[in-house]
Amino acid sequence: MGIIISGTGSYLPKRVVANSELEESLGLPESWIIRRTGIVERRYAEEETLLSMAIEASSRAIGSESGEVGLVVVHSSTRQKAFPSMANDVSAALDIKPKIAFDITSGCVGFLQGLLTATSYMERFRIDLGLVVASEELSRYVDSSDRDTAVLFGDGAGAVLLKRCRGTDVLLESDSGTESSLGNSLFLEMGTNSKMKMNGGEVYKFAVRTLVDSVSRLLGVSGLKPADIDALIPHQSNGRILQAANKQLGFPEDRIFSDLAFLGNTGSASIPITLDRANSKGKLSQGDKVLFVSYGAGMSWTTVLTEWVSRKEERSCILETAFQDY
């Protein structure tokens, strides 16, 4: 048995915050933000909450799936309630009664770490459907006078529905690590009045180096080249980081999927949001090799190579393999 991504979903707040609004409040020259970050605008939650965004993204990922969701894993760097878990709250709102429901907290790498954790649980405990969610309300914890962070972050949520499928496994390879000595380069203390602190220079150097090294290692193990990857979906952090890393990696630009310009850095939610937007626009085809790479607080990284299996092919996959000696 293997695991496929059976559904994707995302939710973005209604309020759009353009660069001009932040440049005026921070006293920055016009076009300063886009030159430094590649960001044009981002979304801020006002009517929405961290939980409501997670619920909506999850509902869209589940879609018309009629099976019982037996596992719910939720990641957020910006949760305010100690317990019960957001996974519990999402399950209750969607009338899900999972065997296992829990949260993890791991910064921007949280979604991919949740993905790997969920697949392990599903295989070990024979769970047929699993939900992995990332929801962030980073705008609440940004110091509005700090131009290093105020211009970068936005809010949103993304989710994927995982399904056990006979004879198919989308997870091909992964690479992870942590440089804990650099942990103070990016942190957020708990508390409603706390603000994010970031050593921009240190984070930039770590991110570029880590993105290049991790992707290179994974491609080496897989025997693949950048041209063999159909879609690279990186953590949407800063345009300069992605550009600097790709000068060394050499991925075709049209295969790098990024919504950074219009969504900003949505933390752990950036990868599932971008995945869902690409999926909904039909940019992914059956058998595509999709590479996810994330890096952030900790300082940690996780890179995952997958093979895309579409909803359209999912049923035939199950029917065909049921009659074959897999």
Image: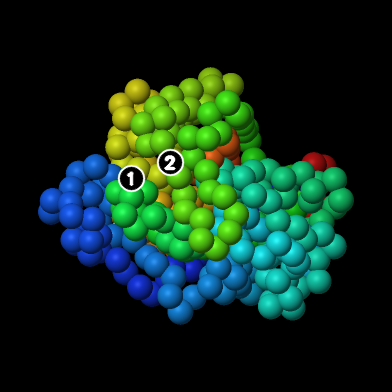
- Indicate the quadrant containing the C terminus: top left, top right, bottom left or bottom right: top right
Residue appearing at x 42%, y 61% in the figure: 139
Residue appearing at x 58%, y 59% in the figure: 191
Residue 53, x across and y down, in percent: 54, 70
Which residue position holds label 2? 198
Residue 315, x across and y down, in percent: 67, 61
Question: Viewed as shown, does residue 175 lie left or right of 226?
Answer: right
Residue 317, x across and y down, in percent: 68, 54
- In the image, 234 versus 225, the foreground residue is 234
Three-letter code, disc 2: Met
SS for dot 1:
helix
Question: Viewed as shown, does residue 49 lie left or right of 239?
Answer: right
Residue appearing at x 52%, y 43% in the figure: 187
CA neighbours of label 1 inside 10 A, class few (<14), some (14 to 19), many (20+): some
SS for dot 2:
strand
Measure how far apart labels 1 and 2 are at the Cα level: 8 Å
Which residue position holds label 1? 148
Three-letter code, disc 1: Asp
